[in-house]
Amino acid sequence: MKSARPILVIAAALGVMLTSLAAQSSTLHVFYQDKSGQLVHTSTTGSTWTRDTTGLFPSSGSTLASFGASGGTLHAFFVNNSHIVEAYKSGISGWTANDLSVAASSTTILADPSFTELSSFLAPGGSEHVFYTAKSPTSGGNIHVFELYWTSSTGWRNSDLTNLGHGAAVQADPLSQPFSVFTSFVDGTGEHVFYISKNDFHIHHLYYGTSWVDQDLTQITATGGGVGLTGVAATGGTEHVYYVSTTDGGVHELYWSSGTGWKDTNLTIASGSTALPTGLSITSFFNSTGEYVYYFSADVCQGCAGKGLYQLKWTSSTNKWVTTRVLQNQITNPQSAMAATGGATGISQRAFFQAQPPPPSDLNQHVLTYPGQVDLSPGGVLGDAQTPFPNSGLTSFIL
């Protein structure tokens, strides 16, 4: 069992086509691939967004992960030529590419970059962690969870966490995509990685206190399998993982506290909603006002033809979940890319998603915000309105 200790929430960094991270200040950062495939960084401290091209080109369909570090350094991670690469920027200097696979002397074999999941966080003490899924050279081609880990004394190291934690192979069938099979965060109890296991779609938890250990949370909670993972650690010492159930189609929460252990709740039923997710990508954040989960669902209102963006929200004052349709009939062909940030101020409480904007618009996918529906990607993103892959990854954080 994990021991409960005071929580320091450093980052919930979600990979897939997205990730999110809450840090200490008030500049909001978002990364995506533009129409040419270039990695683009855009940021804001208020209502005006500043666009910064990196000159770096991830592989087509690469997922993205990111975090911000002390001193204002920016870190984004992507797949290029079957390697994991870091885009790094400090102060006013330009963007630098760092091939982490080379730096860690990794011989790990990456699958198609469109189906290589990424997630990352910055831990207390300044160690950097990038998690990814790849073929294991020792398991007959099964997909395992790997970690690229950096400290100032060791440099970059590469480890097979599935082997270390005696975990299961990861679900990574391209025919079953797009959905997230991967999310991670760090808190006072240790480091946490969540993934979906091969064939049975069980949700597993790899966690590190003094060594890596694997838990089958689906088995522990006696529930069905899931897809679309997203997760956060809360300041009260609780841990939260949200997913779309493969049994009933609803949004579920796996919740952990030192007093209860792991528990599963169907949030769709708990909130009295009938709006089931359309597509399997969801995102989430936690802040002082509550817990937030976002997903797409087909609008059922009269005259609605598109998708709606839905918000599940829990607050301590009401002690209940409420589902609200926050964008109605204005989203066409939403893709799997979503991200969210949940800082304490209004500007930092944002959800980001990739979709075709409402008419009049071009036929491109764009990165849009909620609230505000600001278009962060003039000219569109990689892919088009009708083609789910390749598409732009999407990642965000506050620094």
Image (spheres, rainbow, N blue to C red):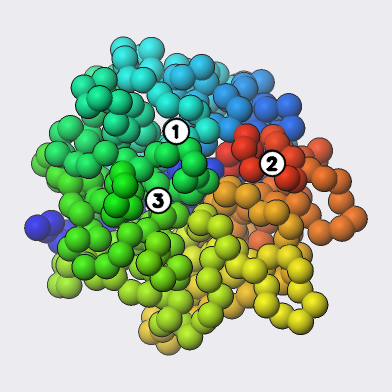
- Above or below for 61 versus 274: above
The answer to whether 375 is drawn above or below residue 153 in the figure is below
Residue on which disc 3 sits: 12
| Quarter-of-image position of residue 261 | bottom left
Mark 2–mark 3 distance (CA, rounded to whole Å): 29 Å
- As drawn, the label of residue 387 is 2
Q: Nearer the viewer, mark 2 or mark 1?
A: 2
Label placed on residue 116: 1
> Is residue 130 visible from the viewing direction of this image?
no
Q: How many marks?
A: 3
Asked whether, in this view, residue 230 is left or right of residue 395, the answer is left
Q: Amino acid at mark 3?
A: Ala
Q: Earlier in the sequence, mark 2 or mark 1?
A: 1
Secondary structure state at the residue bearing disc 3: strand
Extreme residue in the right direction: 360
The x, y position of residue 360, in whole percent, is 90, 55
Residue at disc 1, secondary structure: loop
